[in-house]
Amino acid sequence: MSTDCRVAESDAGEPDPRVFRDPRMVAACFEDLPACVFVFEGPDHVFAAVNRAGRALLSPTRRVIGLPYREALPEVAGQRLVDLLDRAYTSGRPVSGREWRVLLDTEGDGRLREFYLDFTVVPTRPGADAVRGVVWHAMDVTDVVAARRAAEAQATAFEQRYQAALDVVMALQRSLLPERLPVLPGVGMAARYLVADSEQGAGGDWFDAVPLGDGRVGLVVGDVVGSGTRASAVMGQLRAVLMELFLDGCELPEVLARLDRFVARVPGAVASTVCVALLDPAEGRLDYACCGHPPPLVLAADGQVRYLPVEPGGPLGVAAATTATPVQTVWLKAGDVALLYTDGLVERPDRPLQQGLDLLRIVADDARTQGTPPMMAATVPDRVCELTVERMTRDGHTDDVTLLAVQWTGARPTPFHADLPAFPGALAPLRARLDDWLVSLGGSDDDVHAVRFAVLEALSNVIEHAYPDDAGSVRVEGVLDATGRICMTVADVGRWAVPPPHPGNRGRGLALIRACMDTVEIDSSATGTTVLMDRALSHLPAVGPDRAGPRPAVAFGEDGFRVELIEAGSPQVAVRGPIDLCTVTELHQRLQEAGRGGALPLTIDLSGVTHLASAGVQLLYQLTEQMAADGRRLQLVAPAGTAAHQVLALTALNQLADIVETPEGLPR
């Protein structure tokens, strides 16, 4: 059964008395082994011996001695156990396995029980080179596996509950922090919040940027002592009070005094720190004060990097701080970037604070000046925020990290102005100019989509209805005001067409314009019609441990229209470029050809559509109704973030057609 046993045997196969003093003692040891031991002979693996543990595993009443393995244990057919015996027998080498699941009929009633075995199968060669049989040594680890799996399941349940709790905390944090940063003339901003590497989840860090009625913007970065939901709740109160004080027109000394009094009355708010500033984009004046907070860092346009001087000022609500925190003033130069941050960015348990401040100076300066071409194409505040937080937290961070970057550009954006003829050919050149102007302002992709759609839709209405008898002109103007609202005007000198009470699939243009803009006013008279529209532009901060994921690339200014047939059997058509008055007729013809006039199911990929006007919406409604009459649904590919996705939701087409948000989800 083992190498020692083989060596100790004589040529006749009898035990060598020099090694085995008493064969009965050997047999007793074999019987009492805690592991299951099965001895097999020959290529058919006939049971020659089974110890007590092995019999208990198989069932004490089961008779296996003298029977081949397959006959003695028919229920193991297909479980690949006999393959192990064959392999050890034919190769002459041991074979091992861990935690193999084996199903056995231990009661003889046809019901199988589950066991997990660790085993080794060893070939035997008694007194010769030829293999005589195999010995299977197995340990029943069923209880061990069951205990481990129970622990794993419990750990998984705990992990799921823990993750669910973190998700709730992060959802609370996101709801308390600003969803958007304003886009203001002469100012560029970006912000990044990173949750602590701790079990508490989100905490008391916050940031804000509040446009004031006089053109200034209030800036704040603060930190509430503690972490978890309590700190988040306190943070939300302080942010709300600060916003209200800013909007009431309070100057910084009054803001700090009233905030200090409020903090003293809020449990958990005492000793909160804050850096508050007021930036005047008209002249680059920055008034600021730090209450127990690290000083702002300025990355100057001339290459110098300096921390702003701060007068001593204690945290909020602390009785020891008997004197008001002084407000200081600096004048930024065009291109200067000011960084407001929390101590989680610079403090670590294993390094002094000054070392963290010195490191921030180096890292932020490098982030401003160095980067790959795609990085350098981003705005300076965006690049500085992303790279600085990434590099400062590479060795971990035990506290929340918040960074607000504000750049004073010293320049106001040029207003938009275009006078053009009111005919369909004017749409493409206007779209290209408008896209360039909107992107230069720095708004989000959603803002660019919405404003562009509203303006082009208003222009399409002029082309279709204002001049039914002869050619006319239209004027488009736009400006970004001091509060961050983009104000657009589309004016003509034609005739106002009253919308019919029951337009059918037409007449959605005005409703879509209102859905895209914050306010819409129409001034119509005998001398023409003027549509005034405005929308607050926004820049999205990065809030949370990770961003939601890369958004689809947004194509602006791509006016080449084309339709491609991807799959002919079950037609799949990809559309690129704008779907508007100029292209809708061609698209309709191509779709009818692809779908055989509605005889075939149709999938339309709108991922590459740069503008979906109401004329295109009308066409999609017609196709939807046409296919519904034949018992089919139109399938549209429109990933989130694309121009088509937003319009489909606004027009309720997403309820009438099947929307695929990823091209990979298409049937092939």
Image (cartoon, rainbow, N blue to C red):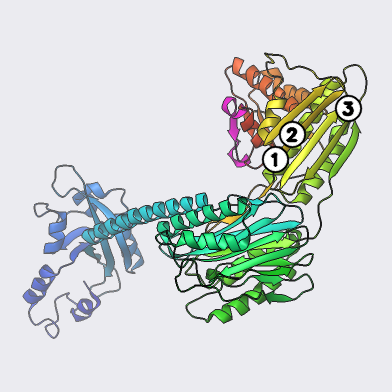
For label 3, the residue is 423
What residue span does the magenta drawing correspond to? 653-668
Q: Residue lying furthest bottom in this view? A: 18
Q: Earlier in the sequence, mark 3 or mark 1?
A: 3
Residue 215 x, y percent position in the rendering: 72, 52
Q: In this rendering, is residue 641 above or below 491?
A: below
For label 1, the residue is 535
Along the line of sight, the residue nearer the viewer: 373 or 420: 420
Identify the amino acid type marked 3. Phe
Q: Earlier in the sequence, mark 1 or mark 2?
A: 2
* Left or right relative to 443: residue 11: left
Q: In the image, what residue occupies the spot 58% across and 49% down? A: 179
Q: Is residue 363 magenta?
A: no
From mark 2 to mark 3, how far is it between C-alphas?
17 Å
Identify the amino acid type marked 1. Arg
Tag 3, which secondary structure? loop
Tag 1, which secondary structure? strand
Q: Quadrant of residue 382?
A: bottom right
Along the line of sight, the residue nearer the viewer: 307 or 571: 307
Q: Are marks 2 and 3 in contact (CB under 8 Å)?
A: no
From mark 3 to mark 1, how far is it between C-alphas?
26 Å
Query: Can I make out residue 554 in this image?
Result: yes
Residue 45 x, y percent position in the rendering: 24, 58
Q: Quadrant of the C terminus?
A: top right
